Amino acid sequence: MAAPGKCFLVSGPPGVGKTTLIIQVLESLKQSNPSLKVQGFYTREVREGAERIGFEVVTLDGRKGLLSSTKISSPESHRWPTVGRYRVDIASFESLALPELQVKEDTDLFIIDEVGKMELFSSSFFPAVLRVLESNIPLLASVPIPKSGRDLPGVARLKNHPGAALYTLNTSNRDTMKEQIYSHLIQLLQNR
């Protein structure tokens, strides 16, 4: 089980800057420790002009793959689960994200952006997240804010984990939160 303070969860409304914060913290950590070994992924919007048409998974070494789309219409895609108007490509997500969540001895930090509804359609994803959490390797992850006052079960389980600290972002506290998370992580990494 992760020790207290080894799991940093970033939450907040869509568009507040959770992914941006995670990437900036990661870049700062790598600047201060160039040999840092980090595994994981983040998600980002796919746009056509001003319209968001989906999301892609991006590994920390730059590989990309589809997470969800409004544009794909194949016989296979009609069986994919949906979130709003997006069809979720579980196979594409798993092919990129799951290898990044393999616990390795020399890993210093895991990044998981995001543990959300689309990602949780994968039956293999949350068990992989739990293995990361139980590995005692620091984890920086983003989670969605509760819809209708209730968290997704996997998100609630992460938030209630004894090693988890939750940072709720808004437009006025982003810089402060970024500095706090960076400071806590740098201390943890120096003490490993």
Image (spheres, grey):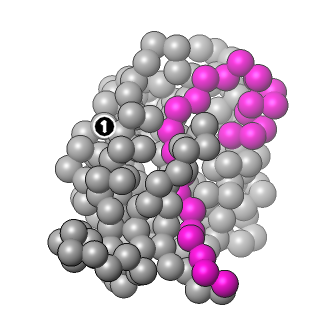
Quadrant of the rendered image containing residue 18: bottom right
Say whether residue 68 is left or right of residue 44.
left
Residue at 76 percent across and 23 percent down: it is 33
Q: Please say if 42 is above or below 53.
A: above
Q: Please say if 54 is above or below 178.
A: below
Name the residue nearer the viewer: 157 or 101.
Answer: 101
> What residue would you read off at disc 1?
128
Name the residue nearer the viewer: 156 or 54.
Answer: 54
* Residue 143 in sight here: no
Q: Please say if 177 is above or below 165.
A: below
Question: Which residues are drawn in magenta?
Answer: 26-49
Residue at 65 percent across and 32 percent down: it is 185
Q: Does the stretch in magenta take in 23?
A: no
- Picture coordinates of residue 168, whole percent (x, y): 57, 61
Quadrant of the rendered image containing residue 17: bottom right
Which quadrant, please, contains the C terminus? Answer: top right
Which quadrant, please, contains the N terminus? Answer: top left
Question: What kind of element bears circle 1?
Answer: helix
Name the amino acid, label 1.
Ala
Residue at 41 percent across and 80 percent down: it is 70
Name the residue nearer the viewer: 184 or 130.
Answer: 130
Say whether residue 174 is left or right of residue 192.
right
